[in-house]
Each structure stands twice: as C-alpha cells, then as structure tokens.
Image (cartoon, rainbow, N blue to C red):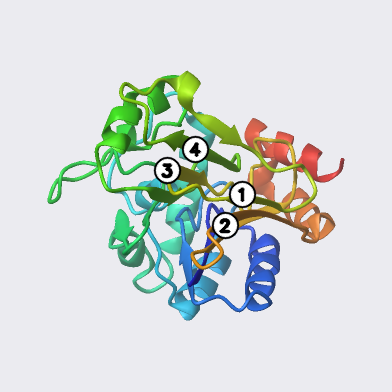
Amino acid sequence: MRAYFFGDIHGNSYALEACLKHLEGLRVDEAYCLGDLAGWLPFGDRILTRMRSLELPTVAGNHDLLIAGLFPDHPHQVDRMQATAYNMGLLSTMPSALEYLSNLPLLIERQDFVVVHHSPFHLPPPGETPDIECFNYLDEVALTGCLKAWRDTPLRLIFSGHDHIPAVYEISDGAESPRFEDVNIHTPPPDEAHTISIDPRCRYWVKAGSVGGPYRDSVPLANSVLYDSDSQTITLYRIPFPTDQLHKDMSSHPFCRNLPTLHRYMELLTQ
C-alpha cells in the first residue's frame, strides 16, 4: 500500500497544483490532506474549491478552525489573526465553506498509521472542543513531553504537518524512559527527495512540511510525503512550482502589502 500526505496549503494554488500533478505520477492507493487549506495567503477560496472537488480525506488544521470561528488565536499572533479575518470574510461568501471547515475531523486513524494536523497527544478528549493550545509547535520541550505517551500507545506511525519544516522523528521502542536525546531526526536536503527505511523496532513521527508556505526552512518548494508499506519506506519530497507567478499575485494584492510575515514570504520567493 502506498499512501501520500500533503498539507498546509495556505491558499497557494500554484504549489497545490504542482503537488497534485506529482501525486498523479506516483500511482498511490490513498492520499490524505493534513489540513490548513486556507490561511496566510488571501486566496483561500481557490483552494477550498479545488480541494472539495477532490474529496480527499482531510483533517482540520488550526487555520481552518480559526477561519471557521471555533476558537480565538493567541493574542500575539497579529499577522495570523489578520489572515484569519480576511479569509473568514472571503470564505463566508462561498456556500457552506465555513461549515465544511468546522466539520473536518481532528484525527483519522488507519490500520498502521494515524493522520493529524499537529499532534495526536495534544488533542482534547472525544466530544470536547479544541482550542489554540492544541496547536502549539513541536519544539524540543513539546516533543519531550510526548515521548512516553507515544511509546505507550499503538501509534507507531504518525503523519502530520503544521510546523512547516519537513522532518521524520524516529525513536526506538527499547528506550524505557525516552529523552529528547534518544530521538533521531531525519531532514531532507533542500532540493531533492529523501527516503528513510523503516526499522520495525522503531516509531516514526513524520512532519510533512508545507505545500504552500510560508517556508520556515527557507526552501520555497512544496513538500509532501509518500509512505510505502510494502517497501517499508518513507520519502520526503521537494516539489518546484511557479514561484514567480505567486509573487506576482501577492505583490498585486493589497492585503499582502502590510503583513511582515508575507513580506518575508515574498522576499524568499525572489531568492
């Protein structure tokens, strides 16, 4: 079985189409979206229209739930709140768009892996509403706090996005009291695919990176992941897309002129 994972599209239709074209050439059995369809870029309507037509299994990202109005953001996230407000207004003009985002599942479980936007260990109990604290980033402190729970659950393979930095976290089942130092972190080179062989004595948490940016590793390429259960491999992909066209769209849109996050994004696209 071959499964493909991508997410954090954030309104970037050029990167999404490049990713979908790449997906078509891989002959996969299943494909999953890791959430954050909209947010950041002021083009969330393009992505929602395209993704709803594909009907792929999709988990809810924090941007999706913020846009749907399920909970407020951290007060210091000024740029993100502005992006949320813009896309909420934009998508409210599309029939059932906000309802679609609010009804996306937080987690999808399959026989040998789980799909989530950020972390299965930070989600609320079933029936309870998530909040923004469920979507903090996977830094050293957060990962260390998850290690015992990860080791003690059947979740041997986790596929998620959110952090916008592609990486595979590997930990051995043999660690009785796992520490951050016990985690082996695999990261892809900046301009090519990277394949990791799965060790049956280990667990893997795969952070797929971002399709649409902002690219926090300063590599303006769309990111995706292929899991092949037959060959027992995980491959991290870097996919080029027309960054010049995206830069043109952003430069001509008034919303992008005054947000520092998007200024840095546009500067990266020209490098």
- Residue 85 is marked as none
Q: Is residue 268 left or right of residue 68?
A: right
Residue type pointed to by label 2? Thr
Q: Splitting the image into 4 quarters, where does residue 12 fall?
A: bottom right
Separation of disc 2 and disc 4 at Cα?
A: 13 Å
Instruction: Measure the alpha-carbon separation of dots 3 and 2.
Output: 14 Å
> Which residue is tagged 3?
201
Q: Is residue 50 above or below residue 36?
A: below
Residue receiving disc 2:
233
Residue at disc 4, secondary structure: strand
Residue 259 at least partly seen: no
Picture coordinates of residue 176, whole percent (x, y): 31, 24
Q: Secondary structure at mark 1?
A: strand
The C terminus: image quadrant: top right
Q: Which residue is most to the left?
A: 127
Rendered position, 231 above or below 130:
below
Q: Earlier in the sequence, mark 4 or mark 3?
A: 4
User: Which numbered mark, 3 or 2, is in the foreground of this view?
Assistant: 3
Residue at 32 percent across and 60 percent down: it is: 108
In the image, taking residue 77 as reference, residue 59 lies left or right, namely left
Residue at mark 4: 170
Q: What residue sits 49% from the left and 60% below the top?
A: 90
Q: Position of residue 38 (x, y in %)?
A: 50, 56
Counting residues from the start of the chain, the first of labels 1 and 4 encountered is 4
What residue type is disc 3 on? Arg
Q: Are marks 1 and 4 in contact (CB under 8 Å)?
A: yes
Closer-to-camera residue (68/192): 192
